[in-house]
């Protein structure tokens, strides 16, 4: 009998297996499975434990078990048997006040049903061939590595639908005729950028000085090349010598109405400096401005002098004590407007101390009318004490100073560019036999694009297309683009094809298939030359070779895709910003913080991965991965610069581990307040690998007519919600896990009290946070540290959850009952080999689950 996770035991209840509910869809063509043992085991168990609620007289939940057949090919029947496994394994059924079946009885029934479901699943899986289309990220990376140009498919292709938590699941990645047209159109654009048929274009270098704007507004123009009326507008910003000073957000300096002569990559150089006023200067500016307001009030109402003076002192105290005014450096945002479509080129911090430096950005330009905006996006939170003069230029705040802007390009270190030379390589045939050279070009390109040896007739088909259109094209380059574009629009390129006729048993991937599966797992891109060579020799199939390649590939910068794509989806980072904290209630939340909290969690996962640290650091760590912006937000001194870096957790800090990071708190809140339910579900699903199930239909929020609900704490609101019996069944397990994190507000900032004042302000009399909680097994604990200790004690569940999610991502399909044994072996072997993400990846990559289809 397998080991049973103790987290799911209720006090006084028998042990049982916890199974994750999965809905597996079976083909109607599968024949009925033999089910020896069913009649001896299931009917007696149902008669003894279930018939009162799920028999001929009652069918709670619309579920009747005495007539439920052992037909494991019918998806409707399968779904009901899965519900049985989940309910008895969780001890949700029979109800607590009814006699309980023994551990042995529950284990026997659960294992029998799991085995039958696994058999049916394997039988169904062996009757189909999986074709998995590249998602947008994989397409972009593959084009980069194959063609040599960066192409953002997000502007062209529809978003990829997720399944099983990820957007690389083959069953969800369908394709439509319209998408095929988009793929061909994209291929043409990509090849137009990659291949050239003209002399090297002349390079332009234009300088724009905002101080050329002498206050005449938008009609101030300068001449650059063929552009006779380029507008350089410094806006309402002031000057300091040769510098334009931008000290307010949402106010920009801009250059517009120009066209570059040639499409290509351009370098935008900005000579800029920053000034960060010290606290004393901020207080002095506030005292001056607030003093003027006080004096006006006194002149208008002399009898209110005492009140006005108290207000003045309270406001000045705010500027003397609030963390808002421990300013960071100003932040330069560069926005490109090309053909009426604005996009952000980059955002960076500008060093303080007014030390001018040149900051460079690279962006792709076409010949459409263009413009650039330059903004200072440093945001000072607006509050009751500062709103009256926060927009006043006299108020001391970080200042961005811009001297001039240069535009230079198109940038071509060599000509023809590298993308051209890689495709149209030098060959003795190049100038002597055009047809033979075209065949040579297509053979090499198609082999790499299809990520396998070519089959008979594949090159001949493309050559026939080339020879057909060649008379109509002005040059070889223009003609060869057509079969190359057809290659990029082919299913052999767009799909990660693992072909083969239906078989009774899973088959081993051939070497080139395995090389692709490994590269798209770790790089979200095509194999490189070394993987191709190992596939050609057949060595890629050796476990020792795979382990060696895992180490090499994780050290390659391309493995950053694993961090962004796997961790970003597993942890929910792509949801950051979907429902951001209200700036009225959480004025400290701004765009820079939003970017930083995502980078923190990505950097944290990357630190654990690259330093080969124990995965339990993801639960609780003695280090953070933060930048200056996050350090100010978390109240951690001594961190300077915008780069994410490893920082020790201060002794008095509640941080360290995923559940302490603002990204997680943001996505598990609703924008105006915390949501312990969502946080509890996140903990259960992400860290414990437990699906709490769907919410009861039509329950909704707590009704507003509940007396005193407007002053109730979140804990009190949830207690009212759990009074509904249909809700209590799940929420008794979910809510406490979320309530343990209540010290983190909706923006992720630490708090000791729940604010009920104006715009969520916390007053001295507001209720202290009650972070007491309990695990589903009844173990009591307090707060985030208590939760972390409980998760560490149950680290086997966390390991299982991580292994399940990483395996799903690795093989591009949702897992089922037949995969559970493999997941258990992964976690067991991972623990023997350092308990690291890298060891888990090696276990997955060398497993039959990964190396077969």
Image: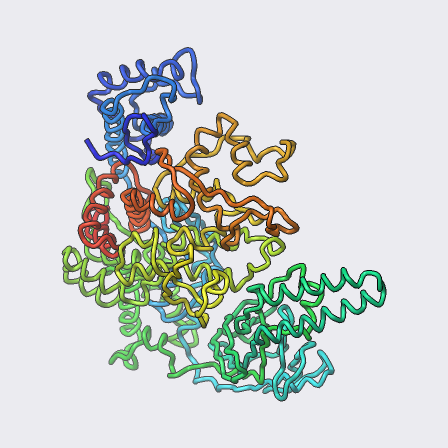
Taking the image as shown, residue 12 lies to the left or right of residue 665, namely left
Residue 276 sits in quarter: bottom right
Taking the image as shown, residue 42 lies to the left or right of residue 369, namely left
Residue 124: percent from left, percent from top: 28, 35
The residue positioned 60% from the left and 46% from the top of the image is 765
338 versus 164 height, above or below: below
Residue 235: percent from left, percent from top: 68, 77
Residue 292: percent from left, percent from top: 76, 71
Q: What is the basis of the colouring in this image?
A: rainbow
51 versus 603 height, above or below: above
Task: Name the one closer to the observer, 279 or 142.
Answer: 279
Task: Name the one closer to the observer, 514 or 805.
Answer: 805
Residue 462 sits in quarter: bottom left
Taking the image as shown, residue 71 lies to the left or right of residue 280, namely left
Task: Name the one closer to the observer, 690 or 438.
Answer: 690
Taking the image as shown, residue 378 lies to the left or right of residue 25, namely right
Residue 63 sits in quarter: top left
Q: Is residue 96 visible?
A: yes
Residue 406: percent from left, percent from top: 54, 84
Q: Quadrant of the N terminus?
A: top left
């Amino acid at each position: 009998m397998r080991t049973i996770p103790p987290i799911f035991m209720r006090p006084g209840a028998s042990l049982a297996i916890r199974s994750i509910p999965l809905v597996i869809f079976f083909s109607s063509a599968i024949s009925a499975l033999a089910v020896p043992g069913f009649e001896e085991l299931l009917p007696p168990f149902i008669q003894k434990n279930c018939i009162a609620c799920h028999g001929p007289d009652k069918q709670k939940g619309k579920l009747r078990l005495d007539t439920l057949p052992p037909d494991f090919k019918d998806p409707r029947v399968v779904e009901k048997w899965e519900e049985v496994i989940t309910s008895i394994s969780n001890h949700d059924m029979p109800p607590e006040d009814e006699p309980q079946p023994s551990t042995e009885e529950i284990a026997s029934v659960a294992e029998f049903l799991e085995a039958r479901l696994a058999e049916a699943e394997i039988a169904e899986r062996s009757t189909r061939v999986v074709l998995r289309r590249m998602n947008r990220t994989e397409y972009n990376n593959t084009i980069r590595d194959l063609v040599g140009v960066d192409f953002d498919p997000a502007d062209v292709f529809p978003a990829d639908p997720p399944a099983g938590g990820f957007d690389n699941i083959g069953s969800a990645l369908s394709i439509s005729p319209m998408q095929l047209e988009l793929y061909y159109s994209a291929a043409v654009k990509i090849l137009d950028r990659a291949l050239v048929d003209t002399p090297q274009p002349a390079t332009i270098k234009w300088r724009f000085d905002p101080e050329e704007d002498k206050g005449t507004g938008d009609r101030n123009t300068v001449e650059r090349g063929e552009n006779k009326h380029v507008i350089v507008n410094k806006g309402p910003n002031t000057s300091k010598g040769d510098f334009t000073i931008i000290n307010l957000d949402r106010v920009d300096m801009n250059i517009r109405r120009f066209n570059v002569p040639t499409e290509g990559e351009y370098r935008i150089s900005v000579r800029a400096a920053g000034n960060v006023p010290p606290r004393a200067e901020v207080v002095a500016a506030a005292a001056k401005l607030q003093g003027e307001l006080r004096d006006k009030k006194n002149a208008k109402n002399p009898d209110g002098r005492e009140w006005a003076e108290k207000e003045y002192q309270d406001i000045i105290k705010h500027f003397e004590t609030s963390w808002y005014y421990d300013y960071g450096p100003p932040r330069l945002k560069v926005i490109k407007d090309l053909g009426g479509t604005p996009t952000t080129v980059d955002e960076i911090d500008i060093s303080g101390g007014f030390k001018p430096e040149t900051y460079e950005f690279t962006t792709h330009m076409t010949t459409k009318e263009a413009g650039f905006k330059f903004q200072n996006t440093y945001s000072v939170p607006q509050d009751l004490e500062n709103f009256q003069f926060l927009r006043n230029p006299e108020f001391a705040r970080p200042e961005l100073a811009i001297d001039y802007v240069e535009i230079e390009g198109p940038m071509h270190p060599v000509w023809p560019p590298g993308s051209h030379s890689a495709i149209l390589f030098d060959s003795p045939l190049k100038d002597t036999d055009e047809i033979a050279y075209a065949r040579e070009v297509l053979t090499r390109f198609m082999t790499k694009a299809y990520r396998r040896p070519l089959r008979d007739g594949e090159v001949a088909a493309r050559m026939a297309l080339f020879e057909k259109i060649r008379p109509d094209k002005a040059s070889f380059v223009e003609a060869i683009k057509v079969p190359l574009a057809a290659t990029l629009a082919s299913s052999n390129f767009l799909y990660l094809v693992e072909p083969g006729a239906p078989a009774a048993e899973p088959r081993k991937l051939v070497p080139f298939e395995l090389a692709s599966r490994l590269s798209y797992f770790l790089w979200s891109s095509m194999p490189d030359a070394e993987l191709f060579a190992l596939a050609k020799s057949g060595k890629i199939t050796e476990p020792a070779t795979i382990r060696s390649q895992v180490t090499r590939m994780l050290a390659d910068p391309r493995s950053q895709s694993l961090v962004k794509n796997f961790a970003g989806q597993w942890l929910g980072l792509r949801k950051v910003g979907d429902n951001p904290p209200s700036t009225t209630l959480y004025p400290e939340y701004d765009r820079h913080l939003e970017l930083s909290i995502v980078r923190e969690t990505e950097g944290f996962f990357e630190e654990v991965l690259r330093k080969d640290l124990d995965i339990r650091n993801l639960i609780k760590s003695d280090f953070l991965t933060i930048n200056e912006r996050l350090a100010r937000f978390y109240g951690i001194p001594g961190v300077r610069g915008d780069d994410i870096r490893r920082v020790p957790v201060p002794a008095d800090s509640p941080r360290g581990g995923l559940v302490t990071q603002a990204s997680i708190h943001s996505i598990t809140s609703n924008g105006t307040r915390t949501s312990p339910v969502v946080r509890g579900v996140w903990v259960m699903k992400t860290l414990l690998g437990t699906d709490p199930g769907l919410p009861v239909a039509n329950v909704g929020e707590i009704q507003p007519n509940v007396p005193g609900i407007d002053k109730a704490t979140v804990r009190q609101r949830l207690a009212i919600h759990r009074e509904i019996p249909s809700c209590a069944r799940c929420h008794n397990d979910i809510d406490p896990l979320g309530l343990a994190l209540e010290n983190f507000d909706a923006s992720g900032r630490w708090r000791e009290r729940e604010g009920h004042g104006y715009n969520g302000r916390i007053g001295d009399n507001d209720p202290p946070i009650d972070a007491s909680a309990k695990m589903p097994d009844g173990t009591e604990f307090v707060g985030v540290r208590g939760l972390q200790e409980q998760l560490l004690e149950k680290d086997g569940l966390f390991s299982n959850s991580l292994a399940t999610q990483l395996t799903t991502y690795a093989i591009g399909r949702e897992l089922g009952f037949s995969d559970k044994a493999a997941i258990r072996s992964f976690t067991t072997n991972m623990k023997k080999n350092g308990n690291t993400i890298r060891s888990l990846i090696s276990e997955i990559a060398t497993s039959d689950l990964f190396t077969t289809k």
